[in-house]
Image: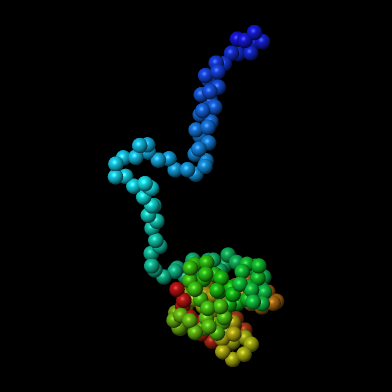
Amino acid sequence: MSKHGTPFIPVSLYVLTFSALLSTACASTGGVPRPFPAPAGAPAEPPAMIVPQPEDRPADGYAIAGTALSLRGSPYRSGGADPNGFDCSGFVWYVFGLHGIKVPRSVSEQFRNGLEVAPDALQAGDLVFFSTEAPGATHVGMVIGGDEFVHAPSARGNVRVERFSSQYWATRYVGARRVR
């Protein structure tokens, strides 16, 4: 004890504590420790990490449809292609882009892209096209399964799910494409 009633701590303990704090600070700098001295013939830099590449396989239609469903409620915006607002083709372009699949931006180009699919062979993630404003494909949605598809309908709505069998959509169907 010191004469003031506090415990006496040797200076060497302060030095050891301070040294330990300094040595741990180096770890947060991002520096990579190197062996010293370097063994003869050792590379100057550590070998690069090998990062596995994704398999070259088609994207899962259910995963694509799931992403589309996660955007339900997003507002419609003419020319929109992000969650702040979508038009129909911008919605498809955005969702497929999240899965690393490039699709054209316009409905007419999307209709010319991919493989044609018969109505009885539709799968989750397939694109379905409708004639809503003029002859030919003017609107696009994405199959989620069964009798349903998800799309960005118009200025009167948000991204939502509809049924193919509804009178409105059934009479306007013009075809489907598979893009993966």
**Picture mark count:** 0
Q: How is the image coloured?
A: rainbow
Residue 56: % across, % down: 38, 67
Report the front residue among 171 and 42: 42
Q: Is residue 44 above or below residue 73?
A: above
Q: Quadrant of the N terminus?
A: top right
| Residue 150 visible in the picture | no
Residue that appears at 36% across and 46% down: 44
The quadrant in which the C terminus is found is bottom left
Is 36 above or below relative to 16? below
**Extreme residue in the left direction:** 41
Specify the farthest residue to the bottom: 135
Nearer the observer, 3 or 41: 41
Confirm whether residue 38 shows in the render: yes
Residue 102 in the image, given as x and y percentages of width and height: 49, 73
Q: Which of 65 and 119 lies nearest the eye of the viewer? A: 65
Residue 21 x/y as whole percent: 53, 31
- Who's the residue at 44% across and 81% down the image? 115
Residue 165: image quadrant is: bottom right
Q: Which x, y percent locates residue 77?
A: 67, 74
Q: Residue at x 29, y 45 (%)?
A: 41
| Picture quadrant of residue 32 | top left
Hey, which residue is sitting farthest right in the picture?
A: 156
Residue at (50%, 38%) from the top-left corner? Answer: 26
